[in-house]
Image: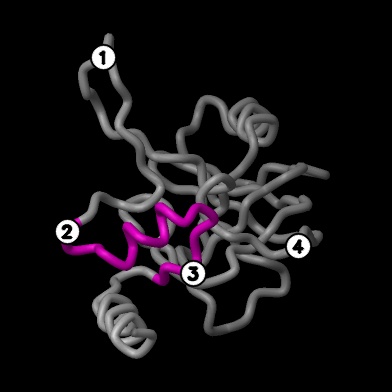
Amino acid sequence: MRAPLTLLAGLLLAGCSANPFAYQRPSDALKAALSLIAPEPCTRVVTDHGRAGAIESLPDRDCYRLRRAERFSGVWYLGEETSTFRPSPTPASLERYETWLDADAVALRRADALAAPALDAGFQVTFVGRRALFPGRFGHIGMSKRLIVMDRLISIERLSSD
């Protein structure tokens, strides 16, 4: 009995587009394993007066398994549909969009105030955050391979736009 279940699990996992072990909730891991026939992981249907409505995504901090908190310093690029981070020093192989930064509300308000009236800006930041346990597809349209969730902003300074 155990061998058929192991085989079935292996076949399901072989077809995954996302790593099912990357998710906190077992239901999201199952959705990832059944990616061809299940809805996206980390989503829920929002009901309106008992009727199914829109599909809503869970916040990254409630979705993915994360490592222990650590201190980060580097450059945060924030703009319309962009929130990427490059640590300092940056490895030469790391591209600008490789790490998505899921910032907390306090950091977003401070960045918006510093950036005004511009929509896109770069910031030198120091913060405490947690990396996703596994690489994946994070951020806007899944363009980033890595994720860092910001837990506490320590400092932020806008970079010159020159």
Percent of width and height locating residue 138: 43, 58
Which amino acid lies under the numbered mark 3 shown in the image of this protein?
Phe
Left/right of residue 51 with respect to residue 88 in the rendered view: left
Whether pointer 1 and pointer 4 mark residues with C-beta atoms closer than 8 Å, the reply is no
The residue located at (59%, 33%) in the rendering is 115
Percent of width and height locating residue 133: 59, 69
Of marks 3 and 1, which one's residue comes earlier in the chain? 3
Percent of width and height locating residue 113: 64, 25
Percent of width and height locating residue 61: 58, 47
Callout 4 environment at 10 Å: few (<14), some (14 to 19), or many (20+)? few
The residue located at (36%, 60%) in the rendering is 30
Of marks 2 and 1, which one's residue comes earlier in the chain? 2
Which amino acid lies under the numbered mark 4 shown in the image of this protein?
Arg
The residue located at (62%, 51%) in the rendering is 149
Callout 2 environment at 10 Å: few (<14), some (14 to 19), or many (20+)? few
In front of the other: 5 or 47: 5
Left/right of residue 84 with respect to residue 2 in the rendered view: right
The answer to which image quadrant residue 14 occupies is bottom left
In front of the other: 147 or 81: 147
How far is the residue under mark 1 from the one under mark 4? 39 Å
Tell me the residue that label 3 is attached to: 21
Which amino acid lies under the numbered mark 2 shown in the image of this protein?
Ile
Span colored in magenta? 19-37
- Where, quadrant-wise, is the N terminus in this rendering? bottom left
Q: Secondary structure at mark 3?
A: helix
How far is the residue under mark 2 from the one under mark 1? 24 Å
How far is the residue under mark 3 from the one under mark 4? 17 Å
Whether pointer 3 and pointer 2 mark residues with C-beta atoms closer than 8 Å, the reply is no
Tell me the residue that label 2 is attached to: 37
**Outermost left residue:** 37
